[in-house]
Each structure stands twice: as structure tokens, then as C-alpha cells.
Amino acid sequence: MTSRDVTIAGFVVVGLAMLSLLVAGWLGRLPRVGDVVDALLARRATRVLVVFVWAWLGWHFLVRTG
């Protein structure tokens, strides 16, 4: 197996896991994704943390130097 095959397999596994969690939410066995996000973002501190993490990721991966 090449590294490309491993990467594709990893994306397939993650995609299937996301799909199974989505279906479990629709069936009522787990909370829906929107409900979880609403619960997480209900506090101001969490929203501020999300903004700082988003800014950090943008700065470290999108800013060109040189």
C-alpha cells in the first residue's frame, strides 16, 4: 500500500464514521449535531475560544512568509 492509499482509506473511514453518527442522530439514539453545537456554543467563553483557535489555525496555515 502506498501512502496515497492509506490517506484515501483514512478519509473513507472518517467519512463513514461521520455518516454513522449522523444517522444515529436522526434515529434518536444520539443527540443531533446541531444540538451538540448549540450546547457547546451556549457559553461566551467557548465562543471566544473557537474564534481564537480559528485565528490561530488561519495564521499558522494560511499566512505566507517570505
Image (tube, helix red, strand yellow):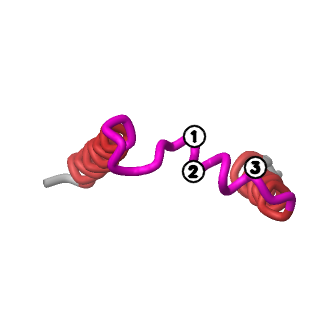
**Disc 3 and disc 1 in contact, CB within 8 angstroms:** no
The residue at 19%/53% (across/down) is: 2
Magenta-colored span: 25-44
Mark 3 or 1, closer to the camera: 1
The residue at 84%/64% (across/down) is: 45
Left or right: residue 36 versus residue 45 is left
**Disc 2 and disc 1 in contact, CB within 8 angstroms:** yes
Where residue 47 appears, as percent x and y from the top left, is 81, 54
Left or right: residue 34 versus residue 42 is left
Query: Dot 3 corresponds to which residue?
Result: 58
Q: Nearer the viewer, residue 58 or 22?
A: 22
Left or right: residue 38 versus residue 25 is right
Mark 3 vs mark 1, CA separation in Å: 24 Å
The residue at 58%/45% (across/down) is: 35
What label does residue 49 carry, if any?
none
Q: Which mark is first along the chain, 1 or 3?
A: 1
Query: Dot 2 corresponds to which residue?
Result: 36
Q: Secondary structure at mark 3?
A: helix
Q: Which mark is first along the chain, 2 or 3?
A: 2
* Residue 59 appears anywhere in the view: no
Left or right: residue 48 versus residue 23 is right
Q: Inspect the image, locate mark 3, and give the three-letter code of the amino acid beneath it.
A: Gly
The verdict on residue 28 being magenta is yes
Where residue 39 appears, as percent x and y from the top left, is 66, 53
Mark 3 or 2, closer to the camera: 2
Query: Dot 1 corresponds to which residue?
Result: 34
* Residue 12 appears anywhere in the view: yes
| Number of residues whose C-alpha sits closer than 10 Å to that of mark 1, classed few (under 14), some (14–19) or many (20 or more) | few
Q: Nearer the viewer, residue 21 or 49?
A: 21
